[in-house]
Every structure is written in structure tokens, then in C-alpha cells.
Amino acid sequence: MNTLIDPQDRATLVAASGRLDFEASAAFQKELEAAIAAAAARKAAVIVDCAGIDYVSSAGLRVFLVAARAAKGASVAFAVHSLTTAVKEVFDVSGFGRIIDVLPDHASAMTKVGAGA
Amino acid sequence: MISLVEELVLLAVEDDGKIAYTAGSHDFSMALVGACLVELNLAGRIDADLETITILSREPTGNVAADAVLRQLDGSHASVRQQVRELQAQSGELMKATLASLISRGVLEKTEARFLWALRSRRYPIVDGREQKEAKLRILSILLSEDLPTPHDTVLIGLAFAGGLLESFLTRRQIAQLSDRIGEIGGLDLIVRGVEAAIRDEAELRAHVMMLSVH
């Protein structure tokens, strides 16, 4: 799994790609937690672009819960967007959309976290 | 710190050391198997999605109940829903192993008494009650707040509800009032979702068998 982190003025953009399974989950969790901590210091939001994530397992899904908890604890706005069909199905079944903001695209995610133009 | 499986079993121990009646149900049996699957997932022995369980390693975790489930997984890539239904018959052994583990940790004691001169009554009095009280308080605190739970508490709440254990410290009315929040939290874990589906399958099957026997 690959992750690109781009800290911008009002939001840190995280672009992840590959399989989010048990093997990838610990490293991705560390990266997200570090991005959230850094964003908290800058009073910025964190937005995760999931367009490149083609698979999420139970272990991978927990990473989003841990990240959402960390963001809430640090008062950092947190959103994900551009879910692939497979990942969207997992989010729908588990009801993750009820605890984190899931948006269709980057622009709507930026607006949602208050970092839009 | 006690494990998820141990915490779930501890919720089934009543104040007088009796094991709750609920613990004999199909629902609890499947919740217990589900807890073992989550332990295995957290320990990196399996991974799961909506369709399959994948075995990552056969190395024992040290949790006797979870390791018993790991040995039973045949690598056929069955779903959580299927495996939970297949393995529920092992729940008596899983319960026994987990009670033994809680006794060895000093959380429970084991006492035996006879009544009517012959019938044995086995009880598991809680030693100081700290672990059980802590689990119940954590569950209540999450259910009554808008906080996001940890993955551990997500599973504990989902499986305690699925296994009928919340009734040991909440009234049915309270559970009904909290049902949206319970559903929201428990559903966040894919393995818990699989357990819930297995419980629904079993209930439908039993209802079907009952209908057939009536006609």
C-alpha cells in the first residue's frame, strides 16, 4: 500500500492506494495518526482520498475508526472521499458513514471540513 | 489486561457466580466464536472481509479459546457468517477454556456445591469485581455519550448485544432506547457484522423448522 501526504494550509491531503488489509493496516494507521497530530498543531483538517484503495478488510476498516477517534480527540475535521465500489460497499455495510464524513469527491470533502475555496 | 473473549465471558457471570442463562443460547455461542475470530484478527492470525476469512498464520496466540478456533479453521475461505455457524458447537469448550483462563488470572474462583445430595452446582464467584465493573462502565459510558469507541469496545458492545449479555446490566427498555446507538457502534466491525448475520440465519432456520413441525 502506498500513501502520499501533502500538508496544505487548511487541510492535509492523504492519498492512499493499494490493498488495506492486515499487513498494510499498522503502517497506514501510523501515517494517519501522524498526519492528524501534525494537522492539529496547524489547526488544519485531514482529508483522505480513497480512490486508489481497491480493498479493505476488517483490520483495514479499524484504521479508519482509530483515525476518526484520533481526529475527534484532537478536534481535527476528518473526511474521506472518492471511495471505490468495493470500499464503499464495506463502508455501507458497516455504517461508517454515520461516524465519519464520506464524500463523493475532493471538492465536496474540502467544503465539508471548512477548507474549501 | 484481560482479552476480549475473557471480557465477553466475564459479562456472562452473575453476581452470585452463576453463569447467566443467556450463555447457553445459540446467540451467545456465536458471539463467543466471533470474539475468538476478532482476537485472531487483532493478533494477525487471520484477516476477514465481507466474503471470506483468510488465514495469515497458524502460530498459536496464547489465548486458549482463540487458538482452538484457529485450529478449526480449515482454510476454505468460508465467510465469517458461515464459520461462526459451523463453529458454534465448540462454544462449550471455548467457554470452559476462557473460564479456566479467568480463574488462573485470579479474576474468578471456582466453587462446587451439591444440592439434593447428588446434583452438582458449579459457580464462578468474581474475586473483586474490578474487571467486570470496568467493562460494564466502559460500555455504558460509550452508549450514553457521542464518543467514538475503540475497536476493542466496538466489538465488545456489538457481541455483548448480539449474545444477549447487555440484559445482565441494562433493562430491556434501556436497551430499546439505546438500540440505535448500539447498532451504530456494533456494526462498525466487519466480524461483528458477520456474527449478526449468522445469528439472523440461525433464527430464520429455527423459525422455519418450527413452522414445518406445526404443519
Image (cartoon, rainbow, N blue to C red):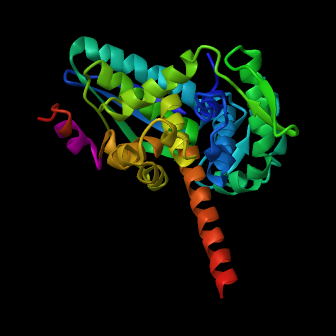
Quadrant containing the N terminus of chain A is top right
Q: Residue at x 32, y 24 (%)?
A: A71
Residue found at the very far bottom of the displayed protein: B215
Q: Nearer the viewer, residue A114 or B128?
A: B128
Instruction: Classify residue B105 by image quadrant.
Output: top right
Residue found at the very far front of the displayed protein: B116
Viewer can see residue B113: yes
Residue found at the very far left of the displayed protein: A117
Q: Is residue A102 depicted above or below B207 in this figure? A: above
Viewer can see residue A56: no
Instruction: Classify residue A72 by image quadrant.
Output: top left
Q: Residue at x 28, y 47 (%)?
A: A105
- The location of residue B159, given as percent across then percent down, is 55, 42
Q: Is residue B192 depicted above or below A70 in this figure? A: below
| Secondary structure, magenta segment, majority class | helix
Q: Is residue B122 shown left or right of residue B47?
A: right
Quadrant containing the C terminus of chain A is top left
Is A109 inside the magenta-drawn segment? yes
Q: Which of A104 and B158 is in front in this view?
A: B158
- The location of residue B130, given as percent across then percent down, is 55, 15
Q: Residue at x 77, y 38 (%)?
A: B94
Instruction: Classify residue A59 by image quadrant.
Output: top right
Q: Which of B46 and A34 is in front in this view?
A: B46
- The location of residue B139, given as percent across then percent down, is 44, 30
Q: Is residue B179 depicted above or below A47 in this figure? A: below
- Magenta residues span A103-111
Is A2 inside the magenta-drawn segment? no
Count the marks. 0
